[in-house]
Image (cartoon, rainbow, N blue to C red):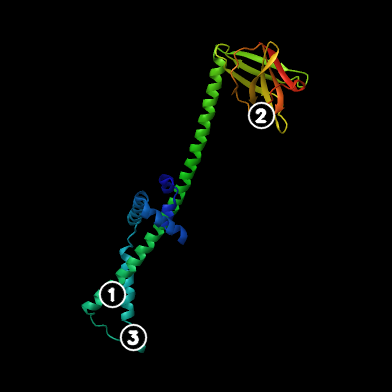
């Protein structure tokens, strides 16, 4: 299990905000007990949410307290069964009781405000998880682009390398418009093929490159039509090169009636 990926997945934030099922919560708690890194991250998230709520807490205005006290006083002054009763000064204990009641109401309002900002924080946490997911996707895309660039750079180096000779094989009667290019280093036998203009092979078929020396075919390997320059088998000597269409995996001898392109060296 990759602890860092689990932490960055956003599931710990959902645990703290109470948005997980019972089974998921038990799983998080079990992993937190097993892995100090997860337990530490849970504590950090809880502290961050508490600081966020306290930071955005809004104290109700003084007028709210005055309104509450006035309502309480009006209630105390009402006449029992329609009879007017002269209000007497309230004992200190009653005043304290009223203040405690007002403080409770203010506390309720403060808690409600905190809940509002806490829910807002949950929304931000969810958006942050989405951003992390997007970043992961973008990282994958960057790796793909990097691999494509490296492949293109390698192909350019082959084409520009003066040690390689480029031999263009032209189409034969079976496919007159086809062309393919081989890049061959005679000194060390390195061989590459760029089959950029061959028809797509049928099911169970694959193209095979041949080197011809003194009229005898030498297997140079099979290749696919993918638009890339592909490395083939080492060939130390050759008078010509040709491509035939063979069963997948190649043949021990070329199928001459399926000879597509050919060129002498």
Sequence order check: which comes first, mark 1 or mark 3? 3
Q: Nearer the viewer, residue 17 or 11?
A: 11
- Report the residue marked by disc 1: 98
Numbered mark located on residue 79 in the image: 3
- Residue at the (44%, 50%) spot, across then down: 10
Say whether residue 50 is left or right of residue 149.
left
- Image quadrant where residue 205 sits: top right
Tell me the element at label 1: helix
How busy is the neighbourhood of tag 2: few (under 14 within 10 Å), some, or many (20 plus)?
few
Q: From the image, state whether disc 1 or disc 3 is nearer to you.
A: 1
Numbered mark located on residue 25 in the image: none
Question: From this viewpoint, which residue is outermost toward the front?
Answer: 252
Tell me the element at label 2: loop
Question: Where's residue 114, x and y in %?
Answer: 37, 60
Residue 120 visible? The answer is no
Residue 208 visible? The answer is yes
Question: From this viewpoint, which residue is outermost toward the left?
Answer: 92
Q: Nearer the viewer, residue 29 or 60?
A: 29
Quadrant of the frame with the C terminus: top right
- Residue at the (31%, 71%) spot, across then down: 102
- Report the residue marked by disc 2: 249
């Amino acid at each position: 299990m990759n602890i860092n990926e689990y932490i960055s997945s956003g599931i710990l934030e959902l645990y703290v905000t109470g948005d997980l099922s019972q089974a998921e919560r038990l799983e998080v708690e079990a992993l937190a007990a097993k892995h100090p890194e997860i337990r530490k991250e849970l504590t950090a998230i809880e502290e961050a949410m508490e600081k966020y709520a306290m930071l955005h807490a809004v104290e109700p205005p003084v007028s709210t307290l005055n309104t509450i006290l006035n309502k309480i006083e009006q209630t105390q002054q009402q006449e029992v069964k329609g009879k007017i009763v002269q209000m007497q000064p309230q004992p200190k204990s009653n005043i304290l009781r009223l203040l405690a009641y007002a403080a409770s109401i203010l506390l309720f309002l403060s808690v409600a405000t905190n809940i509002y900002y806490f829910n807002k924080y949950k929304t931000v946490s969810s958006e942050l998880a989405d951003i992390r997911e997007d970043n992961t996707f973008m990282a994958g895309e960057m790796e793909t682009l990097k691999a494509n660039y490296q492949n293109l750079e390698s192909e350019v180096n082959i084409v520009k390398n003066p040690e390689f000779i480029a031999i263009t094989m032209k189409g034969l009667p079976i496919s007159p418009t086809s062309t393919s290019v081989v890049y061959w280093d005679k000194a060390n036998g390195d061989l590459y093929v760029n089959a950029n203009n061959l028809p797509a092979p049928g099911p169970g078929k694959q193209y095979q490159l041949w080197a011809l020396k003194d009229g005898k075919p030498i297997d140079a390997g099979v290749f696919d039509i993918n638009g890339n320059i592909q490395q083939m088998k080492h060939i130390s000597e050759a008078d010509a090169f040709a491509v035939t269409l063979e069963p997948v995996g190649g043949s021990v001898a070329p199928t001459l009636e399926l000879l597509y392109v050919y060129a002498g060296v």
